[in-house]
Amino acid sequence: MARIQRRTTDHPDWCTRDHRCGIDTHRSPDIVVDATGARGIVTRVRAGDRDYAEITIRIRLDHRDPIAVRQVGLTLHLIRRLMNAVTALRPGTLATGAHRPALDRRQAA
Ligand SMILES: [Zn+2]
């Protein structure tokens, strides 16, 4: 009788090791950021040999369409600024052991 052997998966320390962890991806617990009329969820993801911050944001829009369209445009503009700012950071500019208040926030269930 043939035996099926599966190699154990090496998970990073921050991985949830749950159903969201796939064959070639690892996912951290969700980190929730709340603001008035908005909520963001940030998840650290390892895909292949790179780590990413996966971000889902829900922002309440005005009920008047012209204003909602402007709000969506502003959202896109600010997301681009966020992406550029984070990717421009150099590792040496980030102090280790620094106070990291976002890590103390509650996690999504
Ligand atoms: Zn994993």
Image (cartoon, helix red, strand yellow):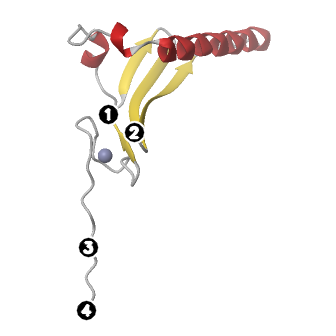
Q: Which residue is mark 4?
A: 1
Counting residues from the start of the chain, the first of labels 4 and 1 encountered is: 4
Q: Which residue is mark 2?
A: 46
Q: Which residue is mark 3?
A: 5
Q: Does the Cβ of the disc 2 residue fall within 8 Å of ligand 1?
A: yes
- Amino acid, disc 4: Met
Instruction: Give SS at disc 3.
Output: loop
Q: Residues within 10 Å of mark 3 (few under 14, many from 20)?
A: few
**Image quadrant of residue 50?**
top left
Q: CA distance from mark 1 to mark 3?
A: 29 Å
Q: Residues within 10 Å of mark 4 (few under 14, many from 20)?
A: few
- Number of numbered discs visible in the structure rendering: 4
Q: CA distance from mark 4 to mark 1?
A: 40 Å
- Amino acid, disc 2: Arg
Q: Residue furthest bottom?
A: 1
Quadrant containing the C terminus is top left
Say if 17 sits above or below 92 in the image: below
Q: CA distance from mark 2 to mark 3?
A: 25 Å
Q: CA distance from mark 3 to mark 4?
A: 13 Å
Q: Which residue is mark 1?
A: 29
Q: In the drawing, does residue 71 fall left or right of residue 31?
A: right
Q: Position of residue 83 (x, y in %)?
A: 55, 17
Residue positioned 36% across, 43% down in the render: 26
- Amino acid, disc 3: Gln
